[in-house]
Amino acid sequence: MIHRPSLVDRMMRAAKLDSNLYEEVEADKGANAQAFSVVLITSIASGLGAGISAIISGESGIWFLWGLLIGIGTGIIGWLIWSLLAYVLGTTIFKGPATEADYGQLIRTIGFSNTPRLLSFFSFIPFIGGFVSFAASVWALVAGVIAVRQALDFSTWRAIGTCIVGWLIYTLIVFLVSGFVIGAKVLF
């Protein structure tokens, strides 16, 4: 039987930006469920923070549920899309001489790089919640660069390039989908 470190241990190491953790989960094909769990847990935390914020703002209880569902949905879908973008960009445009990866490796490493997003739960706290959420996003971005670098076996600069171009494409996708949803809402 293969000994797999606990989810909590791996999340702590991911939060500490331990590059060895990202190498470990890159190679551990059995860590897909753990990576999904990280994304689910952090998405729930983010959704709870948004939901509590809605209630504090005087919105009805349905907005709490709506915030939670949106947090979970966007977290999981965003993780899958972001992993795919990093994989495609990293194995084509930014490919280095030692780059050899599959989509599963990016799913696992990027999943764990979401760990700092746990702090998004505190987004509802007046005055500091926005700062905490922003800091968690920056921390997750740095973890994401490390995750991409380790999974694709290339330099930090190539990882930064992959993340910047991927972020631009991802933002465009979100903008287009949001526009479509808003347009559909107006029509119906």
Image (spheres, rainbow, N blue to C red):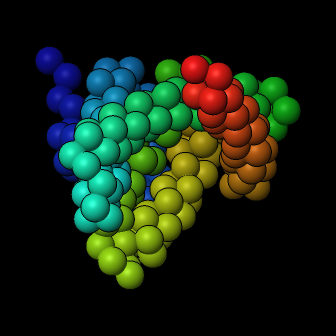
Residue 47 lies, with reference to residue 109, above or below; the image says below
Identify the residue at image location x=58%, y=20%: 188
Residue 150 visible in this rendered orientation of the protein: yes
How many marks do you count on the picture?
A: 0
Q: Is residue 45 above or below residue 37?
A: below
Q: Residue at x 65, y 22 (%)?
A: 187
- Toward the viewer: 50 or 60? 60
Q: Nearer the viewer, residue 151 or 110?
A: 110
Judge by depth and name the residue closer to the eye, 180 or 174.
Answer: 180
Lateral position of residue 105 relative to residue 82, left or right:
left
Counting from the top left corner in percent of width and height, residue 65 is at 26, 39
Is 4 drawn above or below residue 139 in the view shown?
A: above
Residue at position x 36%, y 59% from top?
120
Q: Quadrant of residue 56?
A: bottom left
x, y percentage for residue 53?
31, 61
Q: Is residue 101 visible to us here?
A: no
Give the image location of residue 91, x and y in percent.
74, 27
